[in-house]
Image (cartoon, rainbow, N blue to C red):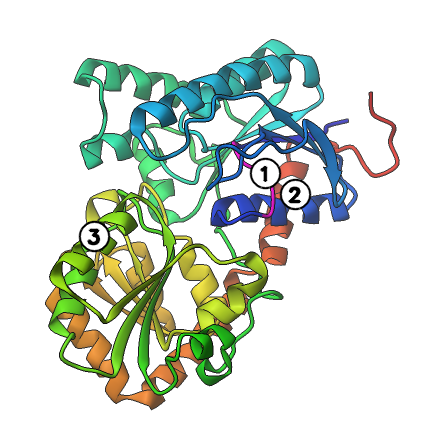
Amino acid sequence: MRRVIFVNRYYRPDLSATSQMLTDLAERLAARGLAVHIVSSRQLYEDPQARLPDEEQIAGVRVRRVWTTRFGRGTLPGRALDYASFYVSVFAMLLRLARSSDVLIAKTDPPLISLVVALAAGLRDAVLVNWLQDIFPEIASRLGVAPWPAWFDRGLRRLRDRTLAAARINVVLGTRMRDHLLSGGVAAERIRIIENWADGDTIQPLPAEHSKLRGRMNLQGRFVVGYSGNLGRAHDFRAILDAAALLAADPEIVFVLTGGGAHMSLLQQEASRKGLSNMLFLPYQPRESLADGLAVADVHLACQLQSLEGLLVPSKCYGIFAAGRPLIFVGDPDGEMSEILRSAGCGMAVADGNGAGLAERILQLKREPGLRLDMGRRARALFLERYTADRAAGSWYSALSACGPLVPAGVREP
């Protein structure tokens, strides 16, 4: 009889989209009667000084939190030390907690946590499942932020590849990620695509004029271009900056950027330096106001560097679809998200770095309100068809059931 044990650095309904997805999934699996455990840190995504309880039960999910250092995400050395302490603490916890009947799910935060979880699974004769939100260390190499030599990078990939080969299932987010694993020699039967999702109950389409935040910001009658979430090293901010500069003479257009990340700070600094008063910045908003926050914008942006196509997926897109808003994707025009937008007719794509192209598409959607409405309706329809939390939970339940019998509700656990 198998318990399901997720390992991820954060677990709490906080401001991180990927942490919230784990919450959605864990609670839905628990609601189906499974024995679900979480091993995480005591921190929050944007608050390294948070001290969450060592143990608690949330909506039927048993949570165990381990000690880590608390340098936060602001610097790479500090983040690396937080990661290292998490690896050590998680390994010790899994040796105490796991047993031969368990399924251990390594979610890729922090990077390469699968190495630790795979070792613990091997020592405890448990089943390993990798949930790949991104492909590391390839991302670090392509971004040019890997602080190690090429020979060490090759060694990390070989170790990572062993965990992929050892896993019963490697869950990826799309066809391009699947293709990347196949090209690396991972057997097709060990790969399963389960796309990320958003909470369609919390996020409902809302007319822009009904957004309370829009009213508080005195944006009624303006054409609002929104960005919501993390803007980090994997995201192109230059195209957004250049488009805002090109559109600065239009008093009706305003950019509202909500969230954080390394490149969000850079974007805010550059906007201030250039005197771009058409760019407004907000911190992360509470989850309960997410639908209202997404409704502020007439059109939303998402971005990803073309060089990272197949290594990660811009998961913020699913919340935009749920909100019934058109999306302009800044990234690979021939990539997976661009193809989804074209096929569903719910958005447009422009190459990263192409600020002029982005400005043109913004102006087109401003001029054509009928097109915006049609794209918004198609976005919501696409969401309901492919990207609901319940649909994803059903796919996960099926995948986990293939690993063997699962502990049902009512079974006493040690």
- Residue closest to the eye, 103 or 110: 110
Q: Which residue is mark 3?
A: 269
- Tell me which corner region of the image, top left, top right, bottom left or bottom right, holds residue 127: top right
Identified by mark 1, the residue type is: Tyr
Identified by mark 2, the residue type is: Ala
Against 218, is 303 above or below?
Answer: above
Residue 16, horizontal then vertical, whole percent: 48, 47
Q: Which residue is mark 2?
A: 26
Q: Residue at x 59, y 61 (%)?
A: 288
Q: Which residue is mark 1?
A: 11
* Mark 2 crowd level (few <14, some 14–19, many ≥20, 10 Å Cα): many
- Tell me which corner region of the image, top left, top right, bottom left or bottom right, holds residue 22: top right
Residue 9, horizontal then vertical, whole percent: 52, 31
Q: CA distance from mark 3 to mark 2?
A: 38 Å
The mark that comes first in sequence, 2 or 1, is: 1
Which marked residue is nearer to the observer: mark 3 or mark 2? 3
Residue 163, horizontal then vertical, whole percent: 45, 21
Q: Secondary structure at mark 1?
A: loop
Q: Main secondary structure of the magenta part?
A: loop
Q: Is residue 389 visible?
A: yes
Q: Is residue 163 visible?
A: no
Which marked residue is nearer to the observer: mark 2 or mark 1? 1
